Amino acid sequence: MLVAIVPAYNEEKNIGPVISGLFNHADKVVVVDDGSVDNTVLEAEEALRQAQGKAGVVLRHKINRGQGAALQTGHEYALKLGADYVIDFDADGQFDVMDIKPALEALQASGADILFGSRFLDNRSRVPRLKRMILLPLARLFDRVFFGINLTDAHNGFRILNKRALSLINITQDRMAHASEIPAQAKKFGLKQIEFPVKVVYREYGQGWGGGLRVVRDLVLGRFVGGGK
Ligand SMILES: Nc1nc2c(ncn2[C@@H]2O[C@H](COP(=O)(O)OP(=O)(O)OP(=O)(O)O)[C@@H](O)[C@H]2O)c(=O)[nH]1
Ligand SMILES: [Mg+2]
């Protein structure tokens, strides 16, 4: 059973089509609403209603806790469901469901425990220059220096975990720094990792400079001040 985990924060415009698209590619869709103040929950519930008979659920955080926390909530739920695999899939419509099947097949064929999507392994993604030339290279450098992680695109929300990875990895970084924490834990637990090319569509600007700096702040605090790890 493949369970899709969709962290969503104020995604009323995107969540419906994302859910509908996922139903053809996953056995169950678990949306984790992260304290949205727009109509994300209503739109998600409507999309689930329209997908009559298909399995889906909307979990809710009462307050906004961050994408990492939303993923952890989803992962714990999937573990209880008995998922064989989970796919983390952003609610903002930037990923392509057509990447799911080949990614899962690549994971299974490789015998790896966890797959990280990368927008830099082919040329389908038109990544904005600031992100491509400054923010993501900085994140890569930071990951390499502090965690010994060598991923081309650690800050990509597309990843697939098998049952083993799902039960071992415990996300403590509530906000965006989880994207470094997951591969760091995978390494610590000796999980086999692979990367796989995925397409990321850019319509409007994402986290920008502020988001990039917040990731570094969360990581530094998490690593040097404790952060519950
Ligand atoms: N920004 C943000 N996203 C959240 C939060 N909680 C859940 N999410 C979801 O996490 C996903 C990724 O958020 P984005 O802000 O697009 O981050 P990103 O994809 O790394 O950044 P871009 O590549 O610039 O789009 C989306 O599906 C959000 O709805 C939160 O507290 N803040
Ligand atoms: Mg995004």
Image (cartoon, helix red, strand yellow):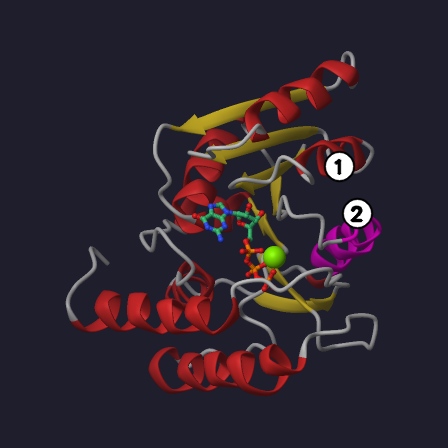
* The N terminus sits in image quarter: top right
The CA distance from mark 1 to mark 2 is: 6 Å
Instruction: Tell me where residue 177 sits by quadrant.
Output: bottom left
Residue at image point 70% right, 57% down: 107
| Number of marks drawn | 2
Residue 56 drawn above or below residue 180: above
Residue 108 magenta: yes
Query: Residue at 62% of width from left, 42% of height from top?
Result: 85
| Residue 172 at least partly seen | yes
* Residue 97: mark: 2
Q: Closest to the observer: 8 or 163?
A: 8
Q: Is residue 168 magenta?
A: no
Mark 1: amino acid = Leu
Disc on res. 191: none
Q: Which residue is mark 1?
A: 22
Q: Quadrant of residue 188?
A: bottom left
Give the magenta-colored segment's residue range. Answer: 96-109
Q: For the residue carrying disc 2, how many other residues have a C-alpha within 10 Å: few (<14), some (14-19), or many (20+)?
A: some
Q: Nearer the viewer, residue 217 or 26?
A: 217
Q: Give the main secondary structure of the magenta stretch.
A: helix
Mark 1 or mark 2, earlier in chain: 1
Left or right of residue 191: residue 98: right
Percent coordinates x, y for residue 30 in the rendering: 58, 30
Image quadrant assignment for residue 123:
bottom right
**Residue 227, x across and y down, in percent:** 21, 59
Mark 1 lies on a secondary structure that is: helix
Q: Amino acid at mark 2?
A: Val
